[in-house]
């Protein structure tokens, strides 16, 4: 019982942490913090936070780092951190935390489509698993489009009491659908880039069996990449790097909680329950984010956001069900093949033993 409860609680904490990241990032950007500076600080803090795990857990087992492996880690830093987070945070700035977290449910479907293109997955429409994955993918994409393009009437209005730091948010852009290309579209692009990283990352894990060290290197490279972009964008504004209390809290939270701590807890759960188990908790991030956006940021919930989120979540679970069934079918098929091979070897051994006995009988005569 305890073995099932602990991973469940930890994954709830992880999704709450990620929802908090969207809320506090949205808050400080609406307050005036440059998104590129914000990302630079985040990667620096993440590097410092994860480095101790790499040192204490992998200092005796760390393999040799080859130039090609270093290049793959660099590629992962560009795709999985810098490009993904830059497109996501600009999209978050021009939309809402609820829409941004809802788009995270696209990641499994996007990864499936990219794997199909790279011929790492088979479509298998003749099977129930293949049909469920395709229907889930279509629903995820349809839900994302609904979130992005349809506004509709207000379902839940603003809460009467708001966090004092978010008062400026009430006078800022609250129409999350006003700028599609700088808002939801960029968030969709970030999910696609992240899915591409998920396909490349296993190559790094195979070549370099030290996940915390490779992650530390990845965040260190991303720190340099984000810092270069931030300096280029803000070369005339030295005050862009200044930190007031709420900005400092955001930087510490995003670097330590949503990067180091969440990564460690998610990795721990993946080892014990598998990646599909972890993916099942993605919709919680949307629920937490919607509630916190309403209570802390004073955001309204529109019918387009609610309908799009529901369609996306249903699509996600349809895809995950198909993926789970696909894996179970493969496991059954492998077991059947192993059983047939064992039976064949047993029959061969019996025939060989019978042949030996016949030879012994003939020689004895």
Image: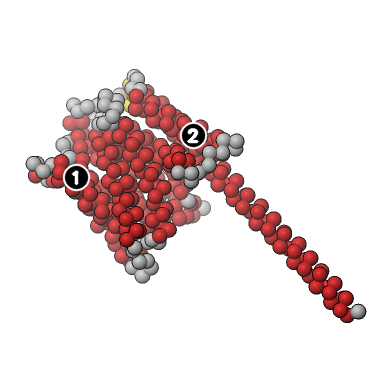
- Nearest to the observer: residue 88 or residue 102: 88
Q: Residue at x 76, y 62 (%)?
A: 347
Q: Quadrant of residue 178?
A: top left
- The residue at the far bottom in this view is 364
Query: In the shown orientation, is residue 228 left or right of residue 272?
Result: left
Q: Nearer the viewer, residue 123 or 309?
A: 123
Q: Residue at x 26, y 51 (%)?
A: 222
Where disc 1 sits, the SS reads helix
Quarter of the view holding residue 50 = bottom left
Of residues 58 and 126, the one nearer the viewer is 126
Q: Which mark is residue 350?
A: none
Mark 2 and mark 1: Cα distance apart in space: 37 Å
Q: Quadrant of residue 142?
A: top left
Residue at screen point 91% across, 79% down: 365
Q: Are marks 2 and 1 in contact (CB under 8 Å)?
A: no
Query: Can you give x and y, in whole percent of width and height, for residue 177 in the image?
Result: 29, 25
Residue annotated with mark 1:
229
Asked if 103 appears above or below 199 in the picture, the reply is: above
Residue 284, visible in the rendered structure:
no
Q: Secondary structure at mark 2?
A: helix
Give the residue pinned by disc 2: 136
Q: Residues within 10 Å of mark 2 (few under 14, many from 20)?
A: many
Earlier sequence position, callout 2 versus callout 1: 2
The answer to whether residue 132 is seen in the rendering is yes
């Amino acid at each position: 019982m305890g073995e099932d409860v602990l991973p469940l609680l930890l994954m709830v904490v992880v999704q709450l942490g990620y929802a908090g990241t969207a809320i506090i990032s949205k808050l400080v950007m609406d307050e005036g913090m440059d998104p590129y500076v914000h990302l630079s600080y985040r990667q620096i803090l993440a590097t410092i936070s994860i480095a101790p795990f790499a040192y204490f857990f992998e200092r005796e087992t760390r393999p040799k780092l080859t130039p090609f492996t270093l290049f793959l880690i660099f590629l992962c830093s560009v795709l999985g951190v810098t490009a993904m987070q830059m497109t996501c945070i600009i999209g978050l700035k021009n939309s809402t935390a609820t829409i941004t977290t809802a788009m995270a449910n696209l990641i499994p479907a996007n990864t499936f489509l990219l794997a199909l293109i790279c011929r790492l997955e088979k479509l298998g429409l003749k099977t129930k698993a293949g049909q469920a994955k395709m229907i889930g993918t279509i629903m995820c994409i349809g839900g994302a489009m609904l979130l992005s393009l349809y506004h509709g009437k207000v379902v839940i209005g603003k809460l009467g009491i708001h966090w004092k730091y978010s008062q400026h948010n009430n006078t800022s852009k609250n129409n999350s659908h006003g700028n599609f290309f700088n808002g939801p579209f960029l968030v969709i692009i970030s999910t696609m880039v992240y899915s591409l990283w998920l396909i490349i990352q296993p190559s790094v894990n195979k070549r370099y069996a030290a996940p915390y060290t490779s992650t530390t290197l990845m965040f260190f490279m991303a720190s340099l990449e984000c810092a270069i972009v931030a300096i280029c964008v803000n070369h005339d504004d030295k005050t862009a790097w200044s930190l007031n209390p709420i900005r400092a809290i955001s930087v510490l939270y995003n670097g330590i909680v949503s990067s180091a701590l969440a990564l460690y807890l998610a990795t721990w759960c993946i080892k014990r329950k598998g990646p599909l188990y972890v993916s099942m908790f993605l919709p919680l991030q949307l629920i937490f984010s919607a509630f916190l956006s309403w209570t802390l940021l004073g955001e309204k919930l529109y019918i387009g956001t609610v309908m799009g989120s529901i369609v996306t979540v249903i699509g996600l679970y349809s895809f995950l069900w198909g993926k789970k069934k696909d894996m179970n079918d493969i496991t059954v098929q492998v077991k059947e093949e192993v059983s047939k091979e064992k039976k064949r070897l047993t029959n061969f051994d019996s025939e060989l033993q019978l042949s030996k006995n016949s030879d012994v009988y003939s020689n004895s005569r």
